[in-house]
Amino acid sequence: MRKTAFQAMLSVFALIILSGAAASAYASTISGTVYDQKRNGLPYVAVELQNDRYVMIQHATTDGIGRYSFDGLGDGTYYVKVMPFKYDMDEQTQEVKIETIAVVGAGNVFIMQDFYLTPRKGTLAAAQAEVIIAQQIPDAAKDKYDAASKLIKKGKTDEAIPLLEAALKSFPEYFLANDALGQIYFHKNDFEHAAPLLLKASQVYDKSPMTLYYLGVSFAYLRYYPTAIMALNAAAVLAPESSAVHLALGKTYISSGDLTSAEASLLKAKKFSKEPTAELYKQLARVYKDTKQYSKAAANLESMLKNGNYSDEAKAALKKEIQEYKAKAIANNEKPSES
């Protein structure tokens, strides 16, 4: 069994209570929640279920409060792998064993496996953990914010919105309320509402790397590239080893047409990534294609293919594109490259 500093083993011996003499095969479920170091659920984190040969058999993304689930599982050894790269935290893998015993009765097996992640030093999450906000908050505003926070932790963000709005009406300079409401709209992809709230939060307190990151990405989606780059560079100063920040910067530089800065930012993202993502290789391939460095473009697409999950049709399209770039590289007398 593979072991790393961030892996832990959990053996679960599950008892299935059956009706009659035979058990229903593939009835077990593995589910749980992915938390940060403050026990906040982490939304939109990629989670893989692997078999005993470490081959992915199911894939999931955590919901708005960090929950995931894998269903229809039979007896055997499984590995649940959490890949929280967007949060600059190390991936974590845990082993789960399902062993069922047939007895008289009825029921299915539900195995709970939670994850508690810690940020890597110098990253966005680590820098954010050190942020301390000191504001004198009116009681009425604080009560509304506290109530909204409880709802957010339960995944009830729509119910939290009017409470946060009420808190801001009472105290417009409330950093935490502006930041929380901005992040809610950000995760809804409503960047027009997210950006002004996050901007206000950053004006109240300009040392929150997470706020600056979300602000920069919001402005990038709204195509305000110079402002987005300013916000993301400010986040990079506070979290210099954040692969997420450098990746966002690289993508924004591409959109602004500055391919030299894009390459530099993407290479920093790669340097600080424990395991570079398919998205990172995709963006590097895009830069090298646009700068006519076809050998490097092909190499990064090959890495993208290895690190992503694609349909057969998508794989075929990527392989075709790789061959086209390799042909152009040969025509340009380029040396073979590695990503």
Image: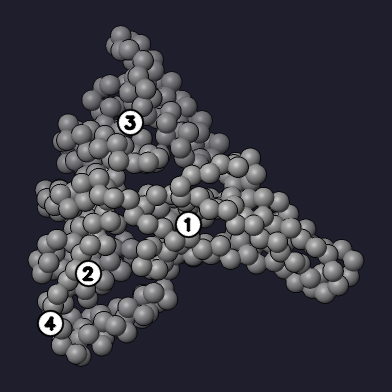
Residue 327 visible in this rendered orientation of the protein: yes
Contact between marks 3 and 4 (CB within 8 A): the answer is no
Label number found at residue 179: 2
Tell me the residue at 80%/63% (across/down).
101
Q: Which residue is mark 1?
A: 61
| Image spot of residue 15 (x, y percent) | 75, 66
Q: Amino acid at mark 4?
A: Gln
The residues tagged by marks 2 and 4 sit, at their Cα atoms, a distance apart of: 16 Å
Image coords of residue 242 (percent x, y): 26, 47
- Rendered view: 313 above or below 242: above
Of circles 1 and 4, the one toward us is 4
Instruction: Identify the secondary structure beneath mark 2.
Output: helix
Name the image quarter holding residue 69: bottom right
Q: Earlier in the sequence, mark 2 or mark 1?
A: 1
Residue 197 showing in the rendered view: no
Residue 27 tag number: none
Residue with the mark numbered 3: 285
Query: Looking at numbered disc 1 in the image, what kind of residue is underneath it?
Result: Thr
The residues tagged by marks 2 and 1 sit, at their Cα atoms, a distance apart of 24 Å
